[in-house]
C-alpha cells in the first residue's frame, strides 16, 4: 500500500538546484582547526530570544489518535517537555484539514479512531465526533498545547464544516487549544480548482473573517485567536499576495491574529530528484531561510510573531535514505537555530504515522511488500539536542558566531538577558558516511555506503568571556555517520525503540575554561556539540532512566558525569555545605592542636 501526503512541487533556489544537478556533495571541507572569538555583544546588538517551543510538531488531524497506539510519541514529548520546562506545541493540520468536518452525534469509537479508521490517505471527507478527542486527550506529556487547522475549502451551509468543527474543538480541548488556522495552503486553491483561478488573499478575506467571527460568537467565554497564512509556496516563489506582507496589506491584522505562518519543504518528494546533500549544506540552508526575513518583519510590524507552520526534509512523507538519516538530525539543529537568529519563533516539523521524516513510527505497517516496525528515527535526537540547548530557568537569546559559519559548519552563541554567555553550539556538517547503523526496522532499507579513509576531526578553539577554571559540560549529538539510521545518541542518551522511554542516561564530558579564557574541543565530521556551564546543568531538570543515580568516571583523563535522578543543585549545595563544615572542623582542630 503506497502512502501519500501533501504532494507539492516547490521550485528550488538556483544554488540548491545546481547542487542537485551536479550530483556532487561539495568540494570543500571543514579545516582541521577552527579558531573563533565570542566577544560580549554590544548593548544594541540584535539578539533574538529563543522560544521554548522552537521545535514544534505538525501532525495530520486524523493521525494523532494512531500515535497513541504506542508510548513512543508520549515519551518523546515528556523528555522534551522536561528539558524545556513547558509542554509541546502540536499543530493538528495538513492536507486532511480541508476534508474534515465534525458531528456531535458521530458515534465512531475512540478505539476505531486509533485503529487507523480513515486509512493512510483519507478519500473524501473525514468526519470526527466526540470520541475522536477521547482517543488522544491526556495521552501525551502534561501541558501539550494544540493548534487546529479548519476546513476552508468546504463552503456548504456557510462554512458549517469549519464552524461546527471549531465548536467541537473548543468543547473538548478547552484551554489546551492555543490557536485556530483557517484553511491549509490556501494559495493552491485557485490552481487546484477549489476556488476561481483569480483567487487571492483579498478574495479570501471575507470568507476567513466570516468563519473567525462565527467561531467567536459561538465562544463568548473564550477569546479565540488565530494563526494566519499557512501558505504552501516558500517565500522565494510567492504567488499573488499569498505571503505575510501580502495578507497584512489585504487586511489580515488584528489582536486576534498573534501568529502568522508559511510552510517550507526544501525538497519535493512528490516529483524530481532528491538527495541527502542539501541537509549538510549550511550555506544552502541559510540562503533559503534568509528569504523569510521580510515575512518576520511583516509579522512583527503588527505586533505578531512568525513561524514555519509546516516543514520537514522532503515533502510527500519524506524519503528513505534522506529523511530517516542522522543528516536530518544535524539539519534540524542547524535549521531551527539559524531560523531563531532571524526571528522565526517556531518551526513545526510535519509527521505522519509511517513517514520516513517523522520523529517516531508508532505502528507496525507494510509498504511496497515490505513489513516495518515501530521505532525511533534520528530526527528525535536532533529535537532532544535542541531541548538541551533550550534548558535554562530564564530567557535565552541567540546569535550566530561571527566567523564561525561556512559551507560545512555553523556555530551559535546563547546568552542570558544580562549579556552573559551561557552556551555555545558548534555543528560540523562535513559529510562522513558509515555502514554502521545503516538500517532501521521502522523504515525501508536503502543503499548502505561508507566514506573512504578515517573520519575527519577538527580542533575548535573558542575565545570566550568566561572566567578561567570554570567547569563546563560538553555534550554531543552523534552517530556512526551522516547516513546512519540507527545508533544515534546525545552523549549516550537514547530512547527505547519499543516505547520511547529513556534507556541510557546522558553523560556530560567535563572540561574547564583555560587561563586565557579559551574553550577547546575536538569535533568529528557529522557531529554537533553543546557547551554550557555545568552549574546550569545541575540547576535544570533532565529526563533520566528510572531509578538511575548520578555517577562520575574518568576516561583517558577526562571526567565524565552521568546524569541521574538524584542529580540536583540542592543536593550539590548540601554536599558542598557538608564539605565546608568538615573543613571548618578540621581547621579548628588543627588550630587547637
Image (cartoon, rainbow, N blue to C red):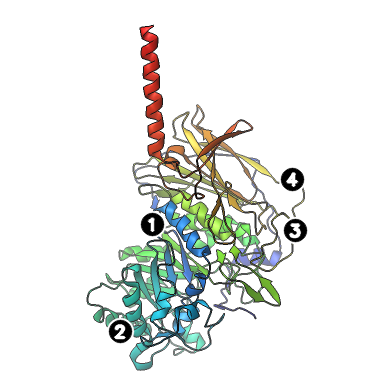
Local secondary structure at mark 4: loop
Figure quadrant of the N terminus: bottom right
Name the residue nearer the viewer: 427 or 44. 427
Q: In the rendered image, which quarter is residue 553 located in?
A: top right
Q: Residue at x 48, y 33 (%)?
A: 471
Figure quadrant of the C terminus: top left
Label placed on residue 486: none
Name the residue nearer the viewer: 234 or 173. 173
**Sequence-earlier tag: 3 or 1:** 1
Local secondary structure at mark 2: helix
Mark 3 and mark 1: Cα distance apart in space: 40 Å
Mark 1 and mark 4: Cα distance apart in space: 42 Å
On the rendered structure, is 151 left or right of 267?
A: left
Tell me if label 4 and label 2 are in contact, CB under 8 Å. Answer: no
Mark 4 and mark 3: Cα distance apart in space: 14 Å
Tell me if label 3 and label 1 are in contact, CB under 8 Å. Answer: no
Label 3: which residue?
449
Q: Is residue 533 above or below residue 482?
A: above
For disc 3, the neighbor class at 10 Å (few under 14, some 14 to 19, many from 20) is some
**Sequence-earlier tag: 4 or 2:** 2
Tell me residue 191's x, y (percent).
50, 85
**Sequence-earlier tag: 4 or 3:** 3
Q: Residue lying furthest left in this view?
A: 220
Label 1: which residue?
86
Label 4: which residue?
454
**Sequence-earlier tag: 1 or 4:** 1
Tell me residue 266's x, y (percent).
56, 67
For disc 4, the neighbor class at 10 Å (few under 14, some 14 to 19, many from 20) is few
Label placed on residue 210: 2
Local secondary structure at mark 1: loop
For disc 1, the neighbor class at 10 Å (few under 14, some 14 to 19, many from 20) is some
Tell me residue 443's x, y (percent).
65, 67
Amino acid at each position: 500500500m503506497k502512502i501519500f501526503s501533501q504532494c507539492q512541487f516547490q521550485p528550488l533556489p538556483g544554488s540548491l538546484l545546481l547542487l542537485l544537478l551536479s550530483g556532487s556533495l561539495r568540494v570543500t571541507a571543514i579545516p582541521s582547526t577552527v579558531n573563533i572569538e565570542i566577544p560580549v555583544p554590544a548593548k544594541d546588538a540584535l539578539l533574538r530570544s529563543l522560544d521554548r517551543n522552537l521545535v514544534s510538531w505538525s501532525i495530520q488531524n486524523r493521525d494523532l489518535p494512531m500515535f497513541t497506539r504506542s508510548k513512543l510519541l508520549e515519551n518523546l514529548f515528556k523528555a522534551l517537555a522536561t528539558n524545556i520546562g513547558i509542554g509541546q506545541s502540536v499543530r493538528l493540520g495538513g492536507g486532511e484539514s480541508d476534508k474534515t468536518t465534525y458531528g456531535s452525534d458521530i458515534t465512531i469509537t475512540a478505539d476505531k479512531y486509533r485503529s487507523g479508521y480513515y486509512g493512510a490517505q483519507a478519500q473524501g471527507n473525514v468526519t470526527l465526533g466526540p470520541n475522536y478527542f477521547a482517543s488522544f486527550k491526556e495521552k501525551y506529556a502534561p501541558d501539550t498545547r494544540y493548534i487546529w487547522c479548519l476546513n476552508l475549502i468546504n463552503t456548504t451551509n456557510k462554512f458549517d464544516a469549519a464552524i461546527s468543527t471549531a465548536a467541537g474543538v473548543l468543547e473538548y480541548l478547552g484551554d489546551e487549544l492555543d490557536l485556530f488556522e483557517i484553511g491549509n495552503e490556501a494559495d493552491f486553491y485557485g490552481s487546484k480548482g477549489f476556488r476561481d483561478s483569480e483567487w487571492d488573499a483579498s478574495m479570501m478575506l471575507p470568507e476567513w473573517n466570516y468563519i473567525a467571527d462565527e467561531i467567536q460568537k459561538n465562544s463568548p467565554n473564550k477569546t479565540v485567536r488565530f494563526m494566519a497564512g499557512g501558505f504552501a509556496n516558500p517565500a522565494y516563489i510567492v504567488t499573488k499576495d499569498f505571503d505575510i506582507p501580502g495578507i497584512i496589506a489585504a487586511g489580515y491584522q488584528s489582536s486576534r491574529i498573534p501568529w502568522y505562518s508559511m510552510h517550507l519543504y526544501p525538497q519535493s518528494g512528490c516529483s524530481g530528484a532528491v538527495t541527502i546533500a542539501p541537509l549538510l549544506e549550511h550555506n544552502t540552508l541559510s540562503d533559503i531561510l534568509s528569504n523569510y526575513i521580510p515575512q518576520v518583519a511583516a509579522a512583527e510590524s503588527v505586533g505578531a510573531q512568525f513561524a514555519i507552520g509546516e516543514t520537514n526534509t522532503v515533502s510527500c512523507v519524506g524519503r528513505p535514505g534522506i529523511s530517516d538519516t542522522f543528516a536530518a538530525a544535524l539539519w534540524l539543529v542547524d535549521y531551527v537555530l539559524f531560523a531563531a537568529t532571524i526571528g522565526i519563533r517556531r518551526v513545526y516539523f510535519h509527521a505522519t504515522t509511517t513517514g520516513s521524516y517523522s520523529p517516531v513510527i508508532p505502528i507496525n505497517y507494510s509498504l511496497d511488500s515490505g513489513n516495518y516496525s515501530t521505532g525511533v528515527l534520528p530526527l528525535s535526537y536532533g529535537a532532544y539536542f535542541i531541548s538541551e540547548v533550550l534548558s535554562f530557568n530564564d530567557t535565552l537569546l541567540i546569535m550566530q558566531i561571527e566567523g564561525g559559519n561556512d559551507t560545512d559548519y555553523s556555530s551559535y552563541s546563547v546568552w542570558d538577558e544580562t549579556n552573559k554567555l551561557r552556551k555555545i553550539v558548534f555543528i560540523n556538517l562535513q559529510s562522513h558516511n558509515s555502514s554502521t547503523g545503516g538500517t532501521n526496522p521502522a523504515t525501508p532499507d536503502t543503499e548502505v555506503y561508507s566514506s573512504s579513509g578515517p573520519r575527519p576531526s577538527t580542533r575548535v578553539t573558542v575565545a570566550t568571556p568566561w572566567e578561567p577554571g570554570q567547569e563546563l559540560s560538553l555534550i554531543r549529538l552523534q552517530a556512526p555517520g551522516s547516513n546512519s539510521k540507527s545508533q544515534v545518541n546525545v552523549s549516550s542518551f537514547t530512547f527505547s525503540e519499543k516505547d520511547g522511554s529513556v534507556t541510557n542516561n546522558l553523560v556530560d564530558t567535563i572540561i574547564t575554561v583555560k587561563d586565557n579564557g579559551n574553550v577547546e574541543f575536538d569535533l568529528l565530521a557529522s557531529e554537533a556539540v553543546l557547551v554550557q556551564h555545568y552549574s546550569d546543568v545541575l540547576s535544570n531538570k533532565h529526563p533520566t532512566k528510572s531509578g538511575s543515580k548520578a555517577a562520575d568516571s574518568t576516561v583517558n583523563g577526562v571526567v565524565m558525569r552521568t546524569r541521574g535522578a538524584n542529580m540536583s543543585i540542592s543536593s550539590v549545595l548540601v554536599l558542598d555545605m557538608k564539605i565546608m563544615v568538615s573543613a571548618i572542623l578540621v581547621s579548628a582542630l588543627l588550630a587547637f592542636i
